[in-house]
Image (tube, grey):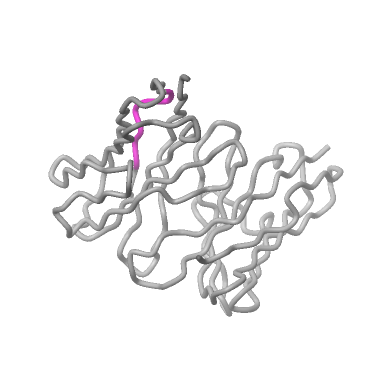
Amino acid sequence: AQTVTQSQPEMSVQEAETVTLSCTYDTSESDYYLFWYKQPPSRQMILVIRQEAYKQQNATENRFSVNFQKAAKSFSLKISDSQLGDAAMYFCAYRTSNTGNQFYFGTGTSLTVIP
Amino acid sequence: GAVVSQHPSRVICKSGTSVKIECRSLDFQATTMFWYRQFPKKSLMLMATSNEGSKATYEQGVEKDKFLINHASLTLSTLTVTSAHPEDSSFYICSARLIQGSNSPLHFGNGTRLTVT
């Protein structure tokens, strides 16, 4: 079974600084997809960034980028120039490529942005 | 972008009653929807995969007779919590993917906070 591990329950960052959130996963598949979702206090899940396992290039979305290390099964999220609105729970997610297509989520990292 | 609507956003019910939660894909067809449960400050736990026109697939440990799922159309899935108990109090979130078999992400509803008294 696939498992997703986020080893940092809580993180904090100064406004305008950079923070990296860690995520590791366990799988026997070679083809899969990885995502980072943000859940602000409103509880609405918002997609931050996605990565296909077959792509070697790390995904980037504005201030958000990932460091995807397939051999190490690591998928960290870097937030640059942190803003107050970045404060939220961040969930790493893994999706299988088989017909089930289920998503599996990590335990989350609560990010605090300090003004 | 794809929108998933979930209703109600909050519901309080008495122990022993049943509660139905609706999940609708507003601007796309979803042959598959997913139901998650989230405890306070915890991750999302996949409960079941709802398949249009067929039986839902439940994750291990989830009681299918307690959490009834009906996916009667390409835009609507419902989760009914039957004979609710206080331990069923939780945050329930539905989701759907825009396109099957691709890297498309999950689009989430706003969630339903269920409180059983």
| Number of on-image labels | 0
Apparent side of residue A37 relative to residue B111 in the rendered image (left or right): left
Name which residue lies at 55% across and 38% down. Answer: A40
Name which residue lies at 62% across and 58% down. Answer: B64
Name which residue lies at 53% across and 73% down. Answer: B30
Taking depth in this image into account, of A55 and B69 the one nearest to the observer is A55
Find out whether residue A6 is within the magenta segment: yes
Up/down of A27 relative to A40, above or below: below
Taking depth in this image into account, of A13 and A33 the one nearest to the observer is A13
Apparent side of residue A50 relative to residue A15 in the rendered image (left or right): left
Residue range highlighted in magenta = A4-10
Position of residue A49 measured from the top left corner of the image (x, y, whole percent): 35, 50
Position of residue A18 measured from the top left corner of the image (x, y, whole percent): 31, 28
Apparent side of residue A11 relative to residue B7 in the rendered image (left or right): left
On the rendered image, what quadrant is the C terminus of chain B found in?
top right
Taking depth in this image into account, of A21 and A15 the one nearest to the observer is A15
Find out whether residue B67 is within the magenta segment: no
Position of residue B52 measured from the top left corner of the image (x, y, whole percent): 56, 76
Name which residue lies at 32% across and 59% down. Answer: A96
Taking depth in this image into account, of B96 and B68 the one nearest to the observer is B96
Position of residue B71 measured from the top left corner of the image (x, y, whole percent): 62, 72
Residue B80, picture quadrant: bottom right
Apparent side of residue B102 relative to residue B87 in the rendered image (left or right): left
